[in-house]
Image (cartoon, rainbow, N blue to C red):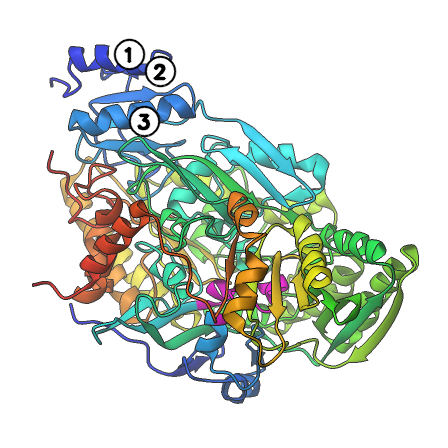
Amino acid sequence: MQSAMTPSMKDALSVVAPRASVMTSAVEMTGYDSDGLGYKHFLPDAVVIPADAEELAKVVDFLHYSGLPIVMRGAGTSLCGGPVAAQGGVIVHTSRLRAIHKICPEGLWCEVECGVILNQLAEALKPSGLCYPPDPSSGPVCTIGGNVASNAGGAHCFRYGVTGNYVLGVEVVLLDGSVRSFGGPAGGRGPWREDWKRFMVGSEGTLGAFTRFWLRLSPRAEKSWTFRATYPDLRSTERAIHGLVRHPAFPVAIELMDPHAVAMVESSQMAVGLPKDHFMIVTEIDGPAALVDCRVDSVAEVLRSAGSKDVLFSDDPADRDKLFKARKAMGGLLGQLGLDYLVQDAVIPKRALAGVLQLIYDEAAAAGFPVVTVMHAGDGNLHPNFMFDSRNPEELEKVEAISKRLMECVVEVGGALSGEHGIGNDKSKYTAMVFGSDSMRMQLAVPKTFDPAHQLNPLKVFPERRFAA
Amino acid sequence: MNERFFEPFVDAVDGVMCVSAAADAADIAGQSAPQGLRFPLLLQGDAPLSEQVAASAFAPASSRFGPYCDNITGMNWELPDGRRVRIGERVVKSTTGYDLLRFLIGTGTRFGRPLDYVLRLRPACDGGGMFSLRGSPESLEIAAAEILRSSFLHWFESVDWIGGNGEPWLRVGVHCPTREWTIFADFLSSLAGRHGLTMQTAPGDGQVMDGLPDLVLKTTPDRVIPLARKMASDSGVRCIAMCYCAAVHVYLPAGSNFLERVTALIEPESDSLNTIGGYWHSRHVEPPNPCAEESAWIETLQNGWSIPA
């Protein structure tokens, strides 16, 4: 198919941004046609990799007048069809904007470019004794820009919070090529009357192109304890979760694996000796050594009194890794169960867990799909993974139908469509379940303010956001 | 689809409750305390919560739990034309659509007003209290910086520098199980000893309500005490610097000409605050007019939010 990025446009772009890499052949663009969702493919018309922030601004300005959709992309680890060219157009890849400009230990902030890798920042912060707490599991590859765009979370955000809680300021290239800062090291509004950065966080590339951020830092915990416990049924598992969320030790993470997930790990070379038909909880407490040491026994007692007969815990880093091993190994094992998987990201009131899990199991069984579920249980953030073969249209239809029924159930019990992955184009069709006509109008007024034609990442967040060149 | 709204509820499992925006501290505690939960972000016991949220983005306990906008998960909101909408969720984590919740919470009544809040509650403990540290201004500042870099930071309810009426002092609040009190006391006692500070303790629940500030200045943690100290010494006003939140709450004497005094106080600070992405805010003074570019954005938003022709 002919690319909408014509040779003359490509030539003009190379004048505007001479150091940028521009790719237009399908072979060159392999890998850019999908994100972590994996099974939905959208080949872009071109991929541009600007050399720096200045060039990125020029590229955005150029593309604005080109009449092509513009899709900003970090590492592409999104799990909701976020940074993909759903309506064609040009993907602008930020992989070369990887500078950590400043770490200010006294002010507890840092200034980073949007393409900085999460674990790169973690390494850079180590000597300061500080940390940036959000920890999505894609940390070794995901970018801060993608994290901010999707308001990413992670296992430890039950106490520490998600990305948005740590964004002090955002520098963004607007569609006209102008560069604006919303906030800064102080985390306020700056010279603006309103706090526009609030819209930028979680906006999934629909309002502007991020170039850099000011992020809040936190002192690193002196010591951590990790606990692992298994439970024979959901009722005892829920008792443990409810006890943990109310415990004054305020765990940093409360992770749940259902029996299907446990069985998957135990049937693999990553087995750690868990009973296959049990639920597993991994939880962690951290803080000053004297404080967490004083809390260990009471946390273990919460886990035991809920009905676990095999509560293990340790403060030794190597042992702690072992206790967390099953949870961490799970993601890599999913591919063994099916060609494709769809992971959902709903957040539910915790008292609705039994009902929602049953719906997941019933739907998967009826469709004949394996399903394994993990959960950031402290937040009620549920990740069921449905395994299927996307080459089979019938299976594709079934998995979409399951997603729809799950989302209807989530909204019915008072939950949210997404806790940390974002909406992308995978869940955009469900937004009408959440927003009434007035609140939908309020939502759509936000992109209208910054991008009235929906040129930036069209068809994401809301299906109404279609770009008409 | 029809608009959905939050109904009044208390969910002890999820630790959330929906209350009227007019609720005060007693109303909130009346529903949350029987569940063993509390809402720690309070500025003044008898003030409606909406007035507290409008007065400042922060309360002393924001040091531990973050600003109001991180502790309010949803709202029923009334638009200027009287229509009502639901903003946000009743679960504590969501990235579903644009974050109208955090945007609107900081806008006062410029885009409407809150009717109800969904509050994130925290476990209530049986112990706690307040530590006061006194000594030379320089030592206090060094001690505060040390607390901010320590692993204890997240477990202190509040870490506040207080000045303007006499010698400055450091106030550290703790809300914890009784058995943990001595751990906090040992840490602060050691800190006081290293920096030549005297320490006093007062038992309680560690929560403090200083009242609604007349002026709020937002800066960075390393600048907040110097800013508060400068304002307190130059103007003789009572200043409370919330060290981790990096916000200064300024309290003017009753009967002041608030407009005149606030204007005089912010005039020398405004530009430097803006430069670092900070701000000033006063419940007595309208914010400065937006620039042309921002005016256009606001107009587009307001047009989009109004009833279509």
Element class at badge 2: loop
Q: Please determine whether, in this image, residue B7 is positioned above or below residue A361.
A: below
Q: Residue at x 57, y 78 (%)?
A: B38
Residue beneath disc 2:
A20
Element class at badge 3: strand
Q: Are marks 2 and 1 in contact (CB under 8 Å)?
A: yes
Alpha carbon separation for disc pair 2 and 3: 10 Å
Residue beneath disc 3:
A92
Q: Position of residue A340 (x, y in %)?
A: 30, 38
Q: Position of residue A140 (x, y in %)?
A: 52, 33
Residue B63 inside the magenta-drawn segment: yes
Q: Viewer-nearest of labels 1 and 3?
A: 1
Amino acid type, label 3: Val
Q: Label 3 marks which chain's residue? A: A
Is A280 displayed left or right of A56 in the figure? right
Q: Residue at x 44, y 81 (%)?
A: B10
Alpha carbon separation for disc pair 2 and 1: 7 Å
Q: Nearer the viewer, residue A411 or B23?
A: B23
Checking the image for residue A461, the label placed there is none
Rate crowding at label 2 as few (under 14), some (14 to 19) or many (20 or more) other CA atoms within 10 Å.
some
Residue beneath disc 1:
A14
Q: Are marks 1 and 3 in contact (CB under 8 Å)?
A: no
Magenta range: B55-72
